[in-house]
Every structure is written in structure tokens, then in C-alpha cells.
């Protein structure tokens, strides 16, 4: 009879260790995002002011921080935030390097941004129409 009790305690202990590791990992990632953003802010101050590339990079840090915060609260990875970050990163590349890009490169980047925006729309519509609560009610 002691084996099932021991097994349950080991499972509970393993779940606790996993949860602690999860929280520690989120804390480390969040700290790294804050640190990197402040390094960027001090670099902007040192150069005398922000440029468009600096502002877009700060938006990427903001989106990363929001993603970690949502993941911390809900225990779910918000896939849409990853796509938002990708759109911002591609927009940053387009805004910074557009003078040196060929036409095909510009069309490729704008096409990629369009595809990612369509993906966001599909995810939003899908999540509102086919939420988990609908699955549980059926």
C-alpha cells in the first residue's frame, strides 16, 4: 500500500520541481529582456537620440516582454505574439535597409509581412470561433 502513496508523492515533488524550473526560466528570460532593453536605451542616449531602427527595436523588446508576461500568467505560449515580433523585425529590416535593397528583396519582405498578417488574422478568427470552451461544451 505504501507504493501508491510514494508514487503520488514523487509525482507531486516532480511537478513542484518542474513548476519551480519553469518560473526560474521565465524570470531569467524576463530579466534578460529588461537588461537588453536598458542597454539599448543607454546606447540611444549615448548617440544623442533615437532613430527609427532604435524605436522599432524597443518595440520588439516590448513585445517579447508582453509575451513572457502572458506566458507567466496563463501558462500558454501566445503564438500571435511571436508573429507580431516577426512582423516588427521584418518591418525594421525594411525601414533600415530599403535604400540598399533590390526591388525583388523589397517585394519579398513586404510579401512575408503580408503573409504573417494574414496568419494573425486566421489565428484571431480561429481562436474566437473555435475556442477551448466550445470544445468542452460539446
Image (tube, grey):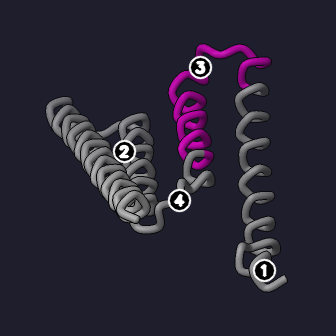
In this rendering, the label closer to the viewer, 2 or 1 = 1
Which residue ends up furthest to the bottom in the rendered image?
137
Task: Name the residue beneath numbered marker 3.
Answer: 99
Which residue ends up furthest to the front in the rendered image?
1
- Is 104 part of what is drawn in magenta? yes
Task: Name the residue beneath numbered marker 1.
Answer: 134
Residue 70 lies left or right of residue 88; in this view the side is left
Q: Position of residue 120 (x, y in %)?
A: 71, 55
Q: Which residues are magenta?
A: 83-106
- Label 3 secondary element: helix
Q: Position of residue 132 (x, y in %)?
A: 71, 73
Q: CA distance from mark 2 to mark 3?
A: 22 Å
Task: Name the residue beneath numbered marker 2.
Answer: 58
* Of the image marks 1 and 4, the number of the one nearer the N terminus: 4
In this rendering, the label closer to the viewer, 2 or 4 = 4
- Label 4 secondary element: loop
* Of the image marks 3 and 4, the number of the one nearer the N terminus: 4
Residue 96's mark? none
Q: CA distance from mark 2 to mark 4?
A: 24 Å
Amino acid at each position: 500500500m505504501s507504493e501508491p502513496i510514494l508514487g503520488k508523492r514523487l509525482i507531486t515533488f516532480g511537478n513542484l520541481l518542474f513548476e519551480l524550473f519553469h518560473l526560474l526560466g521565465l524570470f531569467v528570460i524576463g530579466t534578460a529582456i529588461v537588461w537588453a532593453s536598458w542597454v539599448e536605451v543607454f546606447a540611444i542616449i549615448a548617440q544623442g537620440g533615437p532613430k527609427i531602427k532604435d524605436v522599432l527595436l524597443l518595440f520588439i523588446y516590448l513585445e517579447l516582454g508582453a509575451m513572457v508576461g502572458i506566458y507567466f500568467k496563463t501558462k500558454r505560449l501566445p503564438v500571435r505574439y511571436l508573429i507580431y515580433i516577426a512582423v516588427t523585425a521584418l518591418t525594421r529590416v525594411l525601414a533600415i535597409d530599403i535604400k540598399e535593397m533590390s526591388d525583388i528583396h523589397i517585394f519579398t519582405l513586404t510579401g512575408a509581412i503580408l503573409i504573417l498578417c494574414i496568419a494573425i488574422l486566421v489565428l484571431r478568427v480561429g481562436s474566437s470561433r473555435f475556442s477551448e470552451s466550445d470544445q468542452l461544451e460539446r
